[in-house]
């Protein structure tokens, strides 16, 4: 299949690489010429613009940093909608607010293009390994078309409902993830301050009612989980700046829906303070450092 792939950052590049490995012919566009050259060596075709990439594509996939980029790439003068043919399936895998996903999809629909949203979970490791989770919002017909292609980049492909519901699922999950990581950090730091062995405490939490992914798989306290970022100085993983972005999307969506997200707002401010300290590049589990005395 000839696929237009726009947005070849830390997530998009390994996703595109997996599609090339699966035998697809890719029209590629990104501002990063280095990654374009790398993927061209693997057999990808470099395009001059999103419009050019989409013009002869049988499917369009985008993976972009934020809503402003999505609007520009789709609605801009040389954007996807200026080149894509009517009837071509389109999916945006960026993590953005649900309303932008709906607005851009509505613009696509006016041109006879069925566009869905499919944000991902699994990070750069999952993108490279082809084990991402895709949360898909769109029509039943579009999902049926996308599913086999997304399955070549991911392990779990979930149809969440209409356009925008993929974004809703993503921001609700990450809202809870940010809150739970703060909770685990508080509990581990309190136990340490009160004198219990942190390995013993983690073992109790992970076999009791406080058990959660933020503790049993990704515990923020050093020396608990060998594969967690805490074991390597909070490098790699899911950056705190990305968590801050997702919490911002959640609180903004909540404001529009007049829905309270009290703990989410607190978590957002904690991550905002972490970013202000210059720690936004660390893994989000480094929020535990807010609760530890400097050694």
Image (tube, rainbow, N blue to C red):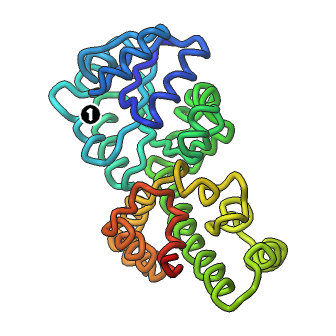
Q: Residue at x 63, y 26 (%)?
A: 152
Task: Say which residue label 1 marks.
Answer: 73
- Please, is residue 154 above or below residue 282 in the view? above
The image shows residue 68, relative to residue 11, as above or below, that is below
Pinpoint residue 255: horizontal percent, then vertical percent.
34, 74
Q: Is residue 248 left or right of residue 233?
A: left
Q: In which quarter of the image is residue 9?
A: top left
Image coordinates for residue 247, horizontal then vertical, percent: 42, 65
Vertical placement of residue 106 versus 267, above or below: above
Closer to the camera in the image, 110 or 21: 21
Q: Position of residue 265 (x, y in %)?
A: 41, 77
Q: In which quarter of the image is residue 62?
A: top left
Residue in the foreground of this view, choosing between 207 and 220: 220
Residue shown at 51% from the left, 29% from the top:
14
Closest to the observer: 196 or 181? 196
Which element type, helix, strand or loop, lies under badge 1?
Answer: helix
- 31, 95: nearer the viewer: 31
């Amino acid at each position: 299949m000839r696929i237009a792939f726009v947005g070849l950052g830390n997530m998009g590049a390994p996703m595109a690489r997996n599609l090339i490995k699966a035998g697809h012919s890719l029209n590629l566009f990104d501002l990063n010429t280095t990654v374009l050259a790398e993927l061209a060596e693997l057999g990808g075709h470099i395009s001059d613009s999103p419009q050019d990439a989409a013009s002869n594509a049988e499917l369009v996939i985008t993976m972009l940093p934020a809503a402003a980029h999505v609007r520009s790439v789709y609605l801009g003068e040389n954007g996807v909608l200026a080149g894509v043919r009517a009837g071509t399936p389109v999916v945006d895998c960026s993590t953005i607010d649900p309303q932008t996903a709906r607005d851009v999809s509505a613009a696509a629909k006016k041109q006879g293009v069925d566009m869905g949203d499919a944000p991902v979970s699994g990070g750069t490791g999952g993108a490279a390994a082809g084990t991402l989770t895709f949360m898909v919002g769109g029509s039943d017909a579009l999902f049926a078309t996308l599913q086999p292609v997304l399955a070549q980049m991911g392990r779990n492909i979930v149809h969440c409902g209409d356009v925008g519901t993929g974004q809703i699922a993503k921001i609700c999950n990450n809202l809870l993830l940010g809150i739970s990581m703060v909770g685990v950090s508080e509990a581990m730091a309190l136990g340490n301050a009160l004198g219990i062995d942190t390995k013993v405490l983690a073992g109790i939490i992970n076999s009791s009612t406080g058990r959660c992914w933020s503790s049993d798989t990704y515990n923020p306290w050093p020396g608990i989980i060998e594969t967690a970022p805490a074991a390597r100085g909070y490098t790699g993983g899911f950056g705190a700046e990305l968590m801050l972005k997702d919490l911002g999307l959640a609180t903004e969506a909540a404001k529009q829906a007049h829905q309270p997200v009290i703990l989410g707002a607190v978590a957002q401010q904690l991550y905002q303070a972490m970013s202000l300290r210059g720690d936004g590049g660390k893994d989000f589990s480094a929020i535990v450092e807010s609760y530890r005395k400097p050694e």
